[in-house]
Amino acid sequence: MVGEKKEERMGRRKFIRNVGVVGAAVVAAAALGYGVSELTKPPPPKPATVPTRPRMRILYQSTYAPALNDWLTARTLEWAAKKGVDVELSTASYLEILPKILTSVEAGNPPDVVYGAGTLIALMAEDPKARHIVPLDDVYNEIGKEDVIEPVKKWYTIDGHIWGIDLFLFVNVVHLIKPFLYEVGRRVEELKTWDDYIEFAREVKKKHPDMYPIGVTLGKTFDGVETWHMFWWPYGGEFMTERSSAGVKYNSQVSRETLKRIVDLYNEGLISPDMLQADEFINNNAYLTRKSAFIVEGPTPYYAAVTRNPALAADTLLLPPPAGPKGMFTWGSKQAMCIFAESKNIDLAKDLLVYIFKNRDNYLQFIKSGYYAAYPVFKSVKEKLKEDPVWASYIEIEPTIVDYTYPLNQPSKAADEVVSKFLFADAFSKVLIEKKDVDVAITEVDVQIKEIFRRIYGR
Amino acid sequence: MADKKGLLVREVREGYLFSLPAFLLLFFILFFPFFYVIYISFFTKIFGYEAIFSGLNNYLEILRDPLFHYSFYITLIYTISAVILKLVIGLGFAILLSQKFKGHSVVRAIAVMPWGIPLFVIAAIFFWFFDYNLGLANLLLKNLFGVRNILWLGPDLVVLSIIYVNVWKGIPFFMVNFLSALQTIPRELYEAAEIDGANSWQRFIHITIPSIKYVILLTCLLSTIWTFSEFDTIFYLTRGGPGYITHIIPIYIYFQAFSRFDIGMAAAASVLTVPLFVTLIAVILWLLRR
């Protein structure tokens, strides 16, 4: 038995050795063959001196208006063809874009150019020791800095430099469905303030008890945060005056009144219960299915109506956001383009931005392709649109475009975290879901906000 | 003797040498990320910023965070409920489909289909299925029974709704495993029991269940691991809401990473779930050895 086993072991070792020998022989033969073929090969023709084409990686956020995406893609590829640049262009939805950017930065391999990094500008540029994007002052100068509307320049300015540029603004407007207005015998001129709209909503509710006339999102989403600001700012609400916890002004009587106002509207049945879901589509759908008499939203639902439901589009009026005693607030959602410092083609990247923005006629076509979904960032383009009767009313809205860091109106990493965590909308959930008192909800959110500011700014 | 020992040592050395490539591959794919997560969990690491050593601070902060406690609680509720339901329904279906009837192979094929659908597609399907105004669920209930619209993804029902989605997706996995296990039970056992006067319930309890108990355990444990770490469908359906009602652990980790922008905190939260997984995996390995 032992002898058999030993023989078997020896056989295996021998086999391995043989395999090794055969393998070595094969490798040696291959090496010999390669050497011989290399020696006998005719010398290769001298390569023509072709300069290597620069290569760029570009990441764009896809918007809800496909025409805008198409324009941006076409314009980018057109530029790449003209400049002889190989472009690797990818897109991501708004839910995916931030994780994609952040992980690529962490991996030390961000794209050269990004569109959709609005809430990351402060994170990428506020700390001089960790700046990952380059200032775009020269791009602004090239495309006409004076022509860019003021808020855009201000909300990307850090240490005297501008770090991002908005492709367009996503301004909130009222989408009012006219038949409801006529049904209750109202005229559009009567709707100016929140009080007017709420009164109108009550009248609609009387006629349609099963309906929820006001379409505003209360869920923990960017739309939910916008809702807060739309009700807060017009009544004098303020978020921050400086980059410190002492500069946070959230815990105020105005905040309590604002929260109570919204909660009362919900409890009165004027806002649909599904608006508490964390979903941006809910109020869009409320408009698209005529389940609300009006919604306040960036005009992509209107884009959807124009392209897919012309009857609804014809029944729609786009109006300025409802005002309060202080005026009206429009969240000019940040749709920033920026260039990463790690890029090996910074000059080319800047050239691309100039190409996208400089030709105002082309930019005008871009804005028009979005059927109001995109608000221009250039004063001159706004002027041109005013000449067009179809656009005049929308452009003349001339909304009060405010950054969420008001009254500071400058980028803030802490403010971006507050927004990314949807803490303003959290107050709605605390009262409507967790059944907490308005005062408790405001106090709790205030504590959370101040903790973030203290952690980030150390004071 | 010495020769024999030397030979053995050489063999062992060769064994290690041959398995080295596979080990290196596994190390870089599996172990390196795992140990890196543990390592980074001791740092404050904001995206794009230098990592700053913070010791156990991340762990302490998370353990003090009431939202983490709630997230852990709701994840357990979600996981346990979903696994129990999948077990019961999956076993029921498996017993049903183990019977011979006309078209049983077609029914089996259809029953397995949900398992093959990608998670994001399932999320999209149920997003519309549960929609308050336009959803198929409300449409059917309204037209068939005149029921008023139900807020499936609202505060009261959202946990049940996400459990429903998980169960819908997971039943085929249970069913297929149980079905294959049922087919290995010798018919003679049932025949003998029948002769001894055992009714169908007694046969089920005393023959079927003991015969497939390890398959049941293994399936449940695997499903527990997958359900506990479920992210895609819940994130797309509810994003952890309304409020924080469906803020399960994976969503908690996601928000630490992409709202607080802190990889260290996200890593620490992930590491805190490891003991649970290790225990489950140890049980699985023990079961597989039997």
Image (cartoon, helix red, strand yellow):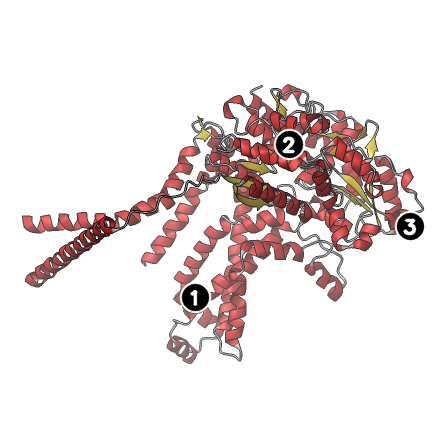
Q: Which residue is mark 2?
A: A165
- Chain under numbered label 3: A
Q: Secondary structure at mark 2?
A: strand
Q: Is residue B198 left or right of residue A337?
A: left
Q: Which residue is mark 3?
A: A183
Q: Residues within 10 Å of mark 1 (few under 14, many from 20)?
A: some
In the rendered view, would you say A453 is above or below A292? above
Q: Is residue A5 left or right of residue A44?
A: left
Q: Amino acid at mark 3?
A: Glu
- Pinpoint residue A206: horizontal percent, then vertical percent: 88, 48
Q: Nearer the viewer, residue A336 or B2?
A: A336
| Front tag of 2 and 1 | 2
Q: Earlier in the sequence, mark 3 or mark 2?
A: 2
Q: Residues within 10 Å of mark 2 (few under 14, many from 20)?
A: many
Q: Which residue is mark 1?
A: B209
Q: Nearer the viewer, residue A373 or B235?
A: A373
On-image quarter of the C terminus of chain A = top right
Q: Is residue B239 left or right of residue A213?
A: left
Look at the numbered discs 3 and 2 and tell me whether their residues touch, using CB distance below 8 Å: no
Regarding residue A321, the answer to whether it shows in the image is no
Q: Amino acid at mark 2?
A: Ile
